[in-house]
C-alpha cells in the first residue's frame, strides 16, 4: 500500500511539473506586456526652454502687426456692389472705426452705415498668426447670421493681402468660396476688392475704397 501511494505521488508531481512547463511555454506575450516594454524605454526629455521660446515668439506682435496698427482711426468707406458680372453697380457708404485690441495683437473694425436702405452694422477682426505666417480675417454684420473667414499672405510688391475665404450662401445653405484683395494704396487710402464665382465664372462683387479722416 505504501509503495502504491509513493508511486502515485511521484506520477502526480511529474504531471503537475509538465503541465506547468507547457503552460509557461504556451503563454503568449500580451499587448499589455508589449506596452510595458515600450514604456520601460526612457523617452528623451522635452526641451522646455525651446517650448517657452516658441510660445513667446507666437505671442509677441511684430512687423506684420504694424500694418494693422497703422490703420487705427476713423475711415470713410465708399462701397460699390455688383450682383453678377453684368449687373449695374449699386452704391452705399459707411464709417469704420478701427482700433487695436489685446495688446496690439489684433485689429478690430466697427462699421456703421446703410445697406439697401436699412441700417448697417458690421464688425471685422484681422490678426497675423506668427505660427502659420498668415493674416486671418473675420467679418460679421446685422445682415445675416453667418461669418466670413479669410486667410491670406502679404504681397510686398503689390502692398496687398490676398485672402482666400469662405462664407455661407443663404440660397443654397452651403458654404461658398470667395477671394479678397486688400490693398494699401497710400497712408490714408485702402481698397478692398471681393470676388465671387457664379456659374463657374469669377467676377468682382464688391469694392470698398476707405479714406482716413
Image (cartoon, rainbow, N blue to C red):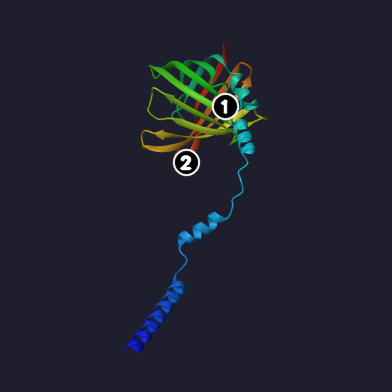
Q: Which mark is residue 143?
A: none
Residue 13, horizontal then vertical, whole percent: 40, 79
Dividing the picture into quarters, in which one does residue 50 lie?
top right
Front tag of 2 and 1 = 1
Q: Nearer the viewer, residue 18 or 175?
A: 18
In the rendered image of this protein, does residue 46 appear above or below residue 80?
A: below
Residue at the disc numbered 2: 200
Q: Which residue is at 51% across, 29% downward?
A: 137
Residue 85 visible from this viewpoint: no
Residue 52, horizontal then vertical, whole percent: 61, 34
Residue at the disc numbered 1: 182
Q: Which residue is at 47% across, 16% downward?
A: 93
Image quadrant occupied by the C terminus: top right
Residue 19, horizontal then vertical, whole percent: 41, 77
Image quadrant occupied by the N terminus: bottom left
Q: Nearer the viewer, residue 121 or 100?
A: 100
In the rendered image of this protein, does residue 133 appear above or below residue 101?
A: below
Residue 111, horizontal then vertical, whole percent: 47, 18
Amino acid at each position: 500500500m505504501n509503495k502504491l501511494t509513493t508511486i502515485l505521488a511521484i506520477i502526480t508531481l511529474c504531471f503537475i511539473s509538465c503541465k506547468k512547463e507547457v503552460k509557461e511555454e504556451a503563454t503568449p506575450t500580451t499587448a499589455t506586456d508589449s506596452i510595458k516594454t515600450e514604456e520601460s524605454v526612457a523617452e528623451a526629455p522635452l526641451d522646455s526652454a525651446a517650448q517657452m521660446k516658441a510660445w513667446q515668439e507666437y505671442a509677441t506682435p511684430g512687423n506684420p502687426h504694424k500694418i494693422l496698427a497703422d490703420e487705427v482711426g476713423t475711415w470713410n468707406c465708399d462701397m460699390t456692389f455688383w450682383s453678377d458680372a453684368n449687373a449695374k453697380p449699386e452704391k452705399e457708404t459707411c464709417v469704420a472705426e478701427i482700433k487695436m485690441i489685446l495688446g496690439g495683437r489684433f485689429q478690430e473694425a466697427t462699421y456703421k452705415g446703410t445697406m439697401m436702405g436699412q441700417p448697417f452694422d458690421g464688425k471685422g477682426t484681422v490678426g497675423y498668426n506668427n505660427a502659420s505666417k498668415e493674416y486671418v480675417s473675420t467679418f460679421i454684420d446685422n445682415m445675416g447670421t453667418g461669418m466670413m473667414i479669410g486667410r491670406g499672405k502679404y504681397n510686398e510688391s503689390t502692398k496687398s493681402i490676398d485672402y482666400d475665404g469662405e462664407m455661407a450662401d443663404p440660397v443654397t445653405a452651403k458654404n461658398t468660396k470667395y477671394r479678397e484683395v486688400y490693398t494699401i494704396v497710400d497712408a490714408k487710402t485702402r481698397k478692398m476688392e471681393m470676388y465671387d464665382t457664379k456659374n463657374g465664372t469669377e467676377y468682382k462683387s464688391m469694392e470698398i475704397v476707405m479714406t482716413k479722416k
